[in-house]
Amino acid sequence: MRQYDELPMMKPFLSFLIGILMAYYFDFPFHVYLVLTFVFLFIGLILMTSYFKKTKWMALSGFSILLSLLFVGSMNYSYKKNYQPLKDGYYSYQGVISKVISRNSDYTRCYLDIIDVNREPIAHPYTVISNISDTLIYAGDTIWASSTLRPLMPSLNPGQFDVRKYYGYKYIYQTSTIKKGNFFVKPFKGFFHFQRWCQQSAVWCGEIFRKFVPERSSLTLQALLLGIKNEISQDMMEVYMQSGVMHVLAVSGMHVGILYVGLLTLLRPLYRRWKYITFISILLVWIFSFITGGGPAILRAAIMLTFVDIGKKINNQSNPVNLLLVSGFILLLFQPYLVWDIGFQLSFVAMLGIFYLMRPIQNLFYFNKNWVKNFLWAPTAMSISAQLATTPLTFYYFGNFPVYFILTNIFILLPITLALYGGILLLLTSFIFPDNINLAIGKILDNIIFYGFDGFLQWMTSLPGAYVNHIYLSFWQVVILSMSIYFFGYWLYHLKNGKWLIGSIMFLFISFLGSWIREYRLSIHPQAHILHVSGQHAIAAENFIWSNTMINDSIIQKNGFFLNGYLRNNGFNSWRIGLPSYAKGDSCLVTIGKSSIFVLNQNLNNFSSENPLVVDYLILGNQLYLNTDELLKKINFSCLVLDAALDYKKYQLFKRLLTEAQIPFYDIRVSGALKISL
């Protein structure tokens, strides 16, 4: 196992990381962190002078400098703050597109830096997430627009991905939808814009793939080489997730490693004449990183390879974990909010797992044949180590586990490598060869991708028990499970010392114990929820889901943003459709335990005023013509609910009528899912 004294970057990296986290949780002004940085740096430098020669003073000097670095991290994150100068409302403004997040067939989602509001410049550019009805805009373009700025949507169901919190880490709080006819775009006319060049390069590559590769594989090829996944069908995305290969679609260190090894192989004959020829490989890797959008994972890999190559030229003693910490430090220096980026976390932890676990896992078995060792067992050990290290985070964020990930990652390595090299070859030959040759190359790529990748993954996910879904771990369970994996790795290095294995099993048991305790608490304190699902009424309790329309797997996938997190958060390993209910016309009465929920979706004239209906919860539907006096006369209810099944105009009307009548109501669009204790 690697000793800590071989990792000089560990303490600086951790200090800088803690400083970023501290700046988020303790919101002090920028100048406070600046003063603290200089104070502790000055103390550290003073203690390093010849006057303080004792060891204890030197230790205090190092500690003081680490504290100054901690406040540098806080200062760096605090400097990136994006204060909210605008209230929610309708504005005319001027802004500059700083980054394109994704493109759809109808709109482009991007970061928009507002610099002028109602023809008055603002002190600091203010960033919002904007959906613009234009698919041909790029970073650097200036836009004049009129639209409503509204807050980002919070988490509305238990376990749902919290968009507001995610962008809040970047100090972005608002979003806007800019429709056609409400904006004017002025393209960037400067000499060079880096983000714009990257995006235009990716668009050009995508056009080449769509032109020469059949449609069934061109979208997958764009995802593999460019990281563009928005056009892939939801069904295929589910296949990728369930088979454990989502990391392949996020252009990352694996792609960089495959490209780098291929380039070194091509340049090997020239290495004896000039040892610095490998810098050409590094340069091409950086170009590839920029063309694919410069994501955190691929930039981390490019930085690591650069330092590895430089280290070999100097003393050939570079420590990969230390280089990983250096690359992470550099990325956080420029983008401190990457601490909360899921892709960055998974990529970083996967590399730690490979460096920490791969060697002892490889040493568990000995093979006489080098080709078995190098081409079969080494990739398998690497896949196991990366998957094992990222398992806690995978459970925490996604709630599923691919059972056959080892076999899947082994068998897709060859087609992925061929697709990567073939895609790059197609981009080069598109300049040189006629279209018929490029179409032939595209057909070969189509067969490799369709049969070797997509078809194989579909077959793997169709096998029984291919994946485990709806797994929930709390933050502390993730920490405890990570400790179990750490102790297990230490035991692999010292197989004769069984106490580390016992410690690993103990932490694993504690992690599972947390899930058992949670399930027990849910069993003795059962709950039901009226959920936020756009366009339909949805009620869930125990292992039942009820809706006014038939809920099935496809609806859950379509509303996965709303439902999957809830299922995972409430321990739904399986679920059944339906709850005890009675339908009358378009209305429906649902009973859960001792609670009754009535969905009123028809005219109140059908109800007798002599015998008012008594229910606990009343949900208003779209077909209702609301008369508040008649409602109070004919239905007795404890809680009135406005849910997400209402169209927006009906929702606004009902809110106004209920407010005027001074009838209290629960608004699921604002307050999120309604919890009902059973």
Image (cartoon, rainbow, N blue to C red):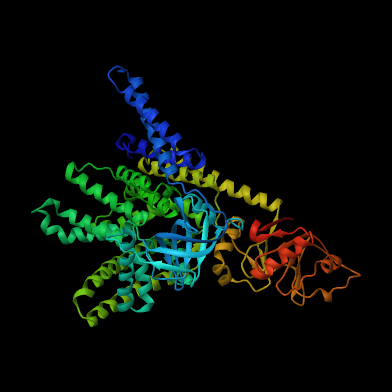
Quadrant position of the N terminus in the picture: top left
Residue 311 x/y as whole percent: 21, 44
Of 443 and 638, the residue lying toward us: 638
Instruction: Give coordinates of residue 378: x percent, y percent.
Output: 30, 55
Splitting the image into 4 quarters, where does residue 249 fall? bottom left
Which residue sits furthest front?
119
Which residue is more in the foreground, 237 or 82?
A: 82
User: Farthest residue in the bottom direction?
Assistant: 436
Say if residue 42 shows up in the picture. yes
Q: Which residue is drawn at 64% across and 74% down?
A: 550
Q: Using the image as rendered, state which of residue 548 and residue 417 is in the foreground.
A: 548
Q: Is residue 426 left or right of residue 250?
A: left
From the viewer's perspective, is residue 623 above or below residue 651? below
Which quadrant: the C terminus? bottom right
Question: Could you tell me which residue is drawn at 30 percent across and 23 percent down?
Answer: 48
Judge from the rendering whether residue 652 lies leftward or rightward of residue 437; answer left or right. Answer: right
470 sits to left or right of 366: right
Q: Is residue 542 visible?
A: no
